[in-house]
Amino acid sequence: MRTKVPPGRDVLLRTVRSRGRDVATGALLGAGHQFGEALVPVLIGLVVDRAVAGGDGGALLTWLAVLAVVYVGLSFSFRFGARAGERAAEQAAHDLRIALVRRILDPVGGAERGQLPGELANIATEDAKRVGAVNMAVMTGISALTGLLVSAVALLRISVPLGLVVLLGTPLLLWLGHLLSKPLERRSEAEQEQAAHASGVAADLVTGLRVLKGIGAQAAAVERYRRTSRASLGATVRAARAEAWQGGVVLTLTGVFIAVVALIGGRLALTGDITLGQLVSAVGLALFLLGPLEVFAWVNAEFAQGRASAARIASVLAAEPGVPTGTAAPADPVRGGLRLRGVSLGALREADLDVRPGELLGVASTDPAAVQALLDCLGRTADPEAGVVELDGVPLPDLDPARLRTVVLVAAHDADLFEGSLDDNLGGTGNTRRALAAACADEVARALPQGTASEITEGGRSLSGGQRQRVVLARALAAERPVLVVHDPTTAVDAVTEARIAAGLREHRRGRTTVVVTNSPALLSVTDRVVLLDGGRVAADGAHGDLVHDDATYRTAVLA
């Protein structure tokens, strides 16, 4: 029966294996460096015994030349070994970031559940970096082990008792170091959790800063972040205290171990069991051992932090899909007919709705929660609790989510723009000019210093609310999806611009299925048909003008 590997440990193993060649190269070169470092005190002892004690100048020059060659070799090994280790660590961290971003952006969703955007960013940066650093720790640990083995062999050749002390004492020190790393692992995990939460809260505050100022809630928001930041600081201090405590105790144990080796060597020299040169070598090796043993303490700390971070990464990579994955492809060609039958999700209750291929349909609602549930169903970020949504007669759960995204685009009201040029945000397609004109975003481009080549800041914060909305709509139109669902695309523009956008939207999407979810009379007036959601159900269906005249609920929803 195979032992089940914990997800975090599996991430660590796969991370090291993925960069196996670099780790092996770095470990080999590092072993060469440690071999040379351990060889130096042995050679110095030989110089003392064979050249200095005998007064042989020629032998002295010969052994000094050998020492010089050894130093050149160990310097070369250290330089290129460290380069290989750093490359393995950085590339592994990069691979993990790519895997995390791929999972977070996977059309099936689910990875973001229960996580703030800032938390996910922290996992993809700090945690990925810590796990990647395990490659360097593995390489360095192998190198240090080589140094210990070479030292033990050399000490055994000098004196069996000295060699046995090293061979028996080193595993004991490593075991104690492992035990001492457990509190650090727990506190490191808590530290990363709190840091990620603080990053998430900060990102939320920055994103909603204008809204917070508008409602006068800055003080409450700052106080919330202050509490979160203090909790993060406390977790960091506790982790640092655990790391310092572990390092101090391990260093003390290591010092005692080195002192024992030196004491035994000194007694052997006094009794004449070893020569003066061998004593010099033994003391030199004992001092050299301090380095590898300190490395093992560092490796234990890196593994402890790496395991904690790997567990957090594993929780994202292994997250359950937000929606089941279908395998079918949409019809070819896509007609664009949508149908909802008895759909219930959240505030949406047993809704029946037909959207004909090529139709421009308006959806008004008395309940924003019902609107969000409808958007979730159409974009398949969630499946209905009951009922079915179909595209050209095929239930959405049967379709591959990635292929569905190439057919149906749900342009959310709060969609973000990205840092980069206006052209980059529009997707760099050949439909940019028409889309800009339809959304009246060509005015935005003309107002910018370099037109569509102008840089905009993250989230589009360098633009006004109305400008940002028009660019977001232009991006959705430029995608040229067979089915487009837009949600409140004109809430931040003036009435004249809104009327122009309504006409441009109708013209640009002529002949293709478009659903406009809004209570804006200007947009609803250009649709072929409007349905009203009231109480989570379709309560009215007809032309905008007729519904305004005949339906009091609709009139209140769109004209109030």
Image: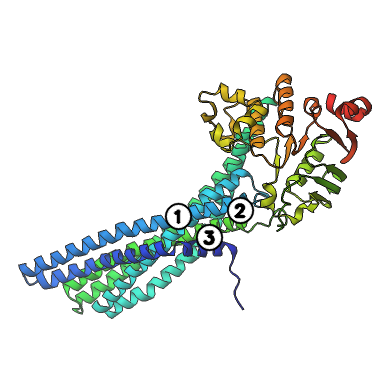
Query: 138 or 48, which lies in front?
Result: 138
Residue at the outermost right position: 550
In percent of the image, x 65 and y 48: which residue is there? 115
Check the image and report above or below for 174 versus 531: below
Check the image and report above or below for 40 versus 383: below
In which quadrant is the N terminus drawn? bottom right
Among numbered discs 2 and 3, the one appearing first in the sequence: 2
Query: 300 or 443, which lies in front?
Result: 443
Q: Residues within 10 Å of mark 3 (few under 14, many from 20)?
A: many
Residue 399 horizontal/vertical position (percent): 73, 54
What is the CA distance from the residue labelled 1 to the residue labelled 2? 18 Å
In percent of the image, x 50 and y 60: which residue is there? 304
The residue singled out by tag 1 in the image is 91
Among numbered discs 1 and 2, the one appearing first in the sequence: 1
Q: Secondary structure at mark 3?
A: helix
Amino acid type at image mark 3: Arg
Kindly tell me whether residue 261 is visible in this rendering: yes
Check the image and report above or below for 16 versus 420: below
Amino acid type at image mark 1: Gln
Q: Is residue 558 left or right of residue 1?
A: right
The residue singled out by tag 3 in the image is 307
Residue 132 horizontal/vertical position (percent): 47, 56
Q: Secondary structure at mark 1?
A: helix
Amino acid type at image mark 2: Arg
In which quadrant is the C terminus drawn? top right
What is the CA distance from the residue labelled 1 to the residue labelled 3? 18 Å
Residue 64 horizontal/vertical position (percent): 13, 64
Q: Residues within 10 Å of mark 2 (few under 14, many from 20)?
A: many
What is the CA distance from the residue labelled 2 to the residue labelled 3? 20 Å
**Badge nearest the viewer, 2 or 3:** 2
Check the image and report above or below for 503 versus 340: above
The residue singled out by tag 2 in the image is 103
